[in-house]
Image (tube, rainbow, N blue to C red):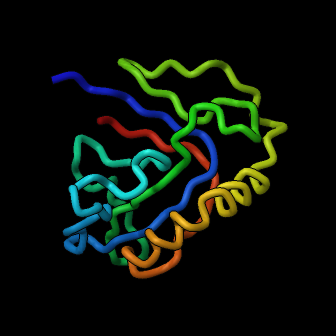
Amino acid sequence: MSVWQNLFVGPFAEWLVPEGKTEGLPPRDNDGVRLFADKLLCNLSMGEPPETITRGRKSYHRYCFMPHAKEPERHGREMYFAGQPAYPTTQELLAVDRQAEVDWLAKKYAKELEALAKKFGGKPRLSWGLICWVS
């Protein structure tokens, strides 16, 4: 079995799911395919729930969804890198308008995020950053 490294730098939608409450997540269609897999990546590592984080005294799995496209049409830079290992190009990120990219994600994927929000039981937190996982 080969391991695929995934690296994403850019806007994402995040849902925190309490430990022990991950059954049926991430949401799937009637054929068992993850919802919007053709449009949005999800940080599932080897099919397992994503990383666990602690907030206060509670632990949560951090489900993150991000654009699948390597070069989103509006921003002209790669956001997603994958491989064995993933080798991103050198990027100068100082000039990136992070809020504009977050706004772009919210607008471009509004329908998908709304549908996911219904499945997760609440709206996501929209943010910008680095996400790594293996698949």
The image position of residue 103, as x and y in percent, is 73, 60
Q: Work out whether residue 58 or residue 48 is closer to the camera in this orientation and state it.
A: 48
Residue furthest front as drawn: 30
Residue visible at 52% across and 77% down? Answer: 123
The image position of residue 48, as x and y in percent, is 22, 50
Q: Is residue 95 left or right of residue 53?
A: right
Residue visible at 66% across and 63% down? Answer: 106
Q: Is residue 85 left or right of residue 47?
A: right
Residue furthest left as drawn: 1
Image quadrant where residue 55 sits: bottom left
In which quadrant of the rendered image does the N terminus lie?
top left
Q: Is residue 56 left or right of residue 110?
A: left
Residue visible at 49% across and 63% down? Answer: 14
The image position of residue 40, as x and y in percent, is 48, 49
Q: Work out whether residue 131 or residue 25 is closer to the camera in this orientation and state it.
A: 25
Q: Is residue 48 left or right of residue 123?
A: left
The image position of residue 57, as x and y in percent, is 35, 77
Image: 3 above or below 52: above
In which quadrant of the rendered image does the C terminus lie?
top left
Image: 45 above or below 93: below
Residue visible at 23% across and 63% down? Answer: 30
Residue furthest right as drawn: 95
Image: 115 above or below 106: below
